[in-house]
Amino acid sequence: MKKLLDVVSVEPHIDNTLLLVFENQDKRLFDMTPYLDKKPFTKLKGSPLFMKATIVCGSVAWPGNIDIAPETLLERSKRI
């Protein structure tokens, strides 16, 4: 079983990507584009809200009770 790692830093970019740093200092890039047509992320598509990503309890979250799990971010992101 893999160890669950928290996200400790997020930097949203205008191209719908998230620059992430995990607690093990692994830096990764996650593309949110495929998710923005699915609920609850549709509220973020083309909205300044996307740029308000923050860290809440090791996950990436946005205002309006929108979040994405750190394990999804780790599994589907690219190491940089």
Image (cartoon, rainbow, N blue to C red):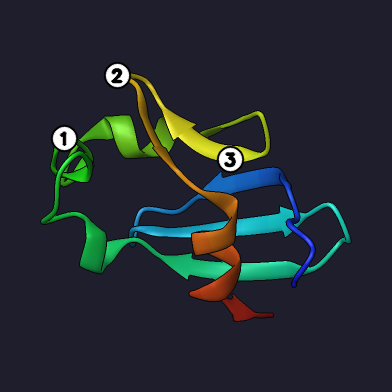
* Residue 59 numbered mark, or none: 3
- Examine the rendering and report whether any part of residue 36 can be seen: yes
Residue displayed at 14% across by 53% down: 38
Q: How crowded is mark 1: few (under 14 residues within 10 Å), some or many (20 or more)?
A: some
Q: In which quarter of the image is the C terminus?
A: bottom right
- Examine the rendering and report whether any part of residue 53 can be seen: no
* Amino acid beneath label 2: Gly
* Residue 64 numbered mark, or none: 2
Residue displayed at 23% across by 68% down: 34
Whether residue 11 sits left or right of residue 63 in the image: it is: right
Q: Where residue 54 appears, x then y in whole percent?
A: 55, 31
Q: Residue furthest front?
A: 1
* Amino acid beneath label 3: Ser
Callout 1 secondary element: helix
* Residue 43 numbered mark, or none: 1
Where residue 20 sits, quadrant-wise, is bottom right
Q: In which quarter of the image is the N terminus?
A: bottom right
Whether residue 16 sits left or right of residue 36 in the image: it is: right
Q: Do the residues labelled 2 and 1 touch (CB within 8 Å)?
A: yes
* Amino acid beneath label 1: Lys
Q: Where residue 25 appears, x then y in whole percent?
A: 87, 61
> How far is mark 2 from mark 1, CA to CA?
9 Å
* Residue 76 numbered mark, or none: none
Q: How crowded is mark 2: few (under 14 residues within 10 Å), some or many (20 or more)?
A: few
Q: Is residue 80 above or below residue 57?
A: below
